[in-house]
Every structure is written in C-alpha cells, then in structure tokens.
Image (spheres, grey):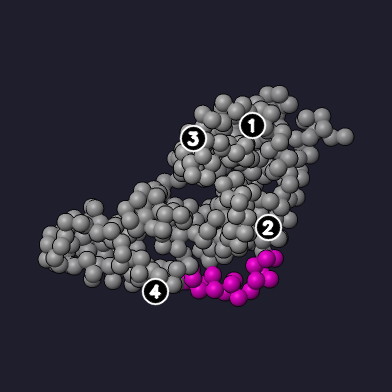
C-alpha cells in the first residue's frame, strides 16, 4: 500500500539538543516505518537570518546529519536531503511569490513573532528573504507532494499559509498540487536548564545530544532549582525545580519517589542533580556512540546525504514537470 508522504526538517544553525529529541526526533524515528518520510536540512532557510555567516550554516549541515543518524533516523527508510541542492524548490518559490501579498506575509503570526525576535539583526528593515520564507517553505513541502507536516502549535500559521498558496495555485492553473495538512505534535516544548520556556541553541540553556559526560555534569549542576530551598533538609517544591522537570524526562521510574523525598526534605539538591546526571548520561551514551561511528566515516556520511538528495531531486523534478505544464511553461 502506498505510504503517505511526510516532510519535516531542521535549520542547520547548530547541533541538536534534547529539546529536539523529545520534541520531534523520537516521533520521526517512529514515523519512518509508517510514512514515506522526507527530512530536509534547510540550509537555504538558515541563511535568511544567517546570511552574514555562511560558514556557520555550512559547518552545521553535517552536525545535524550526524544527530539524525545517531538517534535512529534510517537513510534506508527516510530520505534525508539538503535544501540548497534542490533548485526546483527555489523555482517554485518564485512562482508562488506571485500568489502571496506582502500584507498577508506581515500578518502571519509566526513571522511577526520571529521578526520581533530578530530586532537586533534587522533593525526596522526586515529582508525580503526572511519575510518571504513561508513562501519558500511552501516550495519545500509541495516539491515532494508532502501530505502531512509534523509541527508544533507555533508553526501552524506557516502550514496554513502553504495551504492557501496551494489552493490559489490550483484555482488558477487547475488541480496540480497536493494540499498538506499539519500533524500537531503531542510533545510539549522542552524548557531550558534556566527555566526559560524554550531550550535554544542561542540561549545557552541546552543539553546537546553530543555533549560529553563533563559537559552534561557541569550544565546539570548549574540548573535552576527551588530558590527557597537553602539547606538540605528544607522542604522543597519540585514544581518550580528544573532538575525535577528533567527527572520527568530521564527518570520516569524513579521520579515519584524523588519528588516525594524532595518535598519531605529527605533528598538534597546535589544528590538529586547527581542522579539526574547519571540518568542523562545513560540515555545519551548509545546516541553518542552511534554519532562517533559516523564521525569516523566522513565519506559514508557524505554519501548518505548525496544519495538522499539525489532521490529527493528526482521527485522534485517530477513535481516541476506538472507545475510547468499547468502554468503553460512546458516549452
């Protein structure tokens, strides 16, 4: 039976962290047995706000690929590809740009939020590329006839904008493109070690999948705990403690007991942190070992990316044939 096509991806602006792991990577590993999965390393999209640092983007392409492989994304089951090597995406972006107004892009809630966050970079003048990246994203999805796109709630406006573009294209040129639908992730965004609602590469509050034992230990020992708990036998409040929060992720069998002892003043913060460190290291060790395997085989790594990109390119070419025929551009 033909599998439903799924498209997702990440911007290569840094290594992936446990927020990505619990938020999306685990889901992708499960989905690859049921869906025709396409995972894109979105280097072109990364340049929309890293245009002045292309070396950062280039370097992180392989870091992201290593993280994909290390968590179990299988290149035999999932097409992993590089956005910049699929020129059909750029071509579709140009065609779609005629179907979207500037005002509509400026109203997109996700775009508005991200422009506000990039105030330091853009000042009062946002670039055409950044404002228009939802159009490019529509090119990403439709180039591979993506039927489903797993997203967090904050990304839903981008998928809706893609659906609008598809509907408008089909209404003008005839039924050509597949209208995607969002699959809303049931996983909540993972908080940072500092209690920030977002664990982010640029916020310095993340545990990376590739972190060493020493890095994990240092980060966890500095994690935010109950500020009202001064002495070991003070009664603690796990609800406002980031260490307890991470125990819920990495110590599922023990977390109830851990929290009860914390509330009763029978477990100190240092002991609690040390146990968390041990559990995180235990969980990440097989991931890091798999990563090391591929790090030592750069040619195999490169071949995986090139093979996946070649497969993706063939699919994008077929889509482009249909689009150009519909637009009377098949000279």
Q: Give the range drawn in magenta.
A: 286-303
In this rendering, position of residue 38 left or right of residue 186? right
Residue where numbered disc 3 is placed: 112
Q: Do the residues labelled 2 and 1 touch (CB within 8 Å)?
A: no
Q: Earlier in the sequence, mark 2 or mark 4?
A: 4
How many neighbours does mark 2 have within 10 angstroms: few (below 14), some (14-19), or many (20 or more)?
many
Question: Exactly how many numbered labels are in the figure?
Answer: 4
Comparing marks 1 and 3, which lies closer to the viewer?
3
Give the spatial CA distance, label 2 vs label 4: 35 Å
Position of residue 42 measured from the top left corner of the image (x, y, whole percent): 61, 51
Residue where numbered disc 1 is placed: 166
Question: Is residue 26 visible from the viewing direction of this image?
Answer: no
Labelled disc at residue 214: 4
Q: Are marks 4 and 3 in contact (CB under 8 Å)?
A: no
In this rendering, position of residue 119 left or right of residue 264? right
| Residue 304 on the magenta segment | no
Position of residue 37 measured from the top left corner of the image (x, y, whole percent): 60, 51
Give the spatial CA distance, label 1 vs label 3: 22 Å
Q: Residue at x 51, y 61 (%)?
A: 15
How many neighbours does mark 4 have within 10 angstroms: few (below 14), some (14-19), or many (20 or more)?
few
Give the spatial CA distance, label 4 vs label 3: 39 Å
Q: Say which element carries label 4.
A: helix
Q: Which residue is drawn at 52% across and 54% down?
A: 28
Q: Earlier in the sequence, mark 4 or mark 3?
A: 3
Q: Say which element carries label 1.
A: helix
Residue where numbered disc 2 is placed: 308
The relative height of residue 59 versus residue 285 in the rendered view (above or below) is above
How many neighbours does mark 3 have within 10 angstroms: few (below 14), some (14-19), or many (20 or more)?
few
């Amino acid at each position: 039976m033909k599998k439903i096509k799924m498209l997702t991806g990440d911007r290569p602006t840094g290594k992936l962290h446990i927020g990505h792991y619990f938020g999306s990577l685990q889901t992708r590993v499960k989905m690859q047995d049921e869906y025709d999965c396409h995972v894109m390393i979105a280097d072109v999209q990364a340049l929309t706000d890293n245009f002045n640092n292309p070396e950062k983007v280039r370097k992180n392409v392989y870091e992201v690929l290593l993280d994909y492989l290390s968590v179990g994304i299988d290149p035999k089951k999932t097409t992993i590809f590089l956005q910049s090597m699929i020129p059909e995406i750029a071509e579709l972006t140009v065609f779609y740009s005629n179907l979207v107004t500037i005002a509509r892009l400026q109203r997109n809630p996700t775009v508005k939020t991200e422009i506000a966050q990039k105030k330091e970079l853009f000042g009062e003048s946002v670039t055409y590329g950044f404002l228009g990246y939802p159009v490019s994203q529509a090119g990403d999805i439709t180039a591979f006839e993506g039927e489903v796109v797993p997203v967090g709630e904050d990304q839903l406006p981008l998928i809706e904008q893609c659906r609008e573009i598809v509907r408008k294209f089909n209404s003008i040129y005839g039924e050509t493109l597949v209208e995607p639908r969002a699959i809303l992730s049931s996983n909540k965004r993972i908080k940072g070690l500092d209690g920030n609602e977002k664990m982010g590469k640029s916020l310095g509050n993340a545990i990376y999948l590739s972190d060493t034992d020493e890095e994990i230990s240092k980060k966890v020992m500095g994690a935010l705990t109950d500020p009202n708990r001064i002495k070991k036998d003070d009664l603690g409040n796990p609800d406002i403690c980031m260490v307890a929060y991470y125990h819920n992720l990495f110590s599922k069998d023990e977390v109830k007991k851990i929290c009860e002892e914390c509330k009763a003043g029978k477990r100190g913060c240092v002991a609690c942190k040390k146990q968390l460190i041990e559990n995180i290291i235990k969980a990440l060790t097989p991931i890091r070992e798999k990563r090391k395997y591929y790090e030592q085989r750069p040619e195999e790594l490169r071949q995986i990316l090139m093979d996946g990109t070649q497969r993706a390119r063939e699919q994008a070419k077929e889509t482009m044939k249909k689009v150009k025929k519909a637009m009377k551009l098949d000279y």
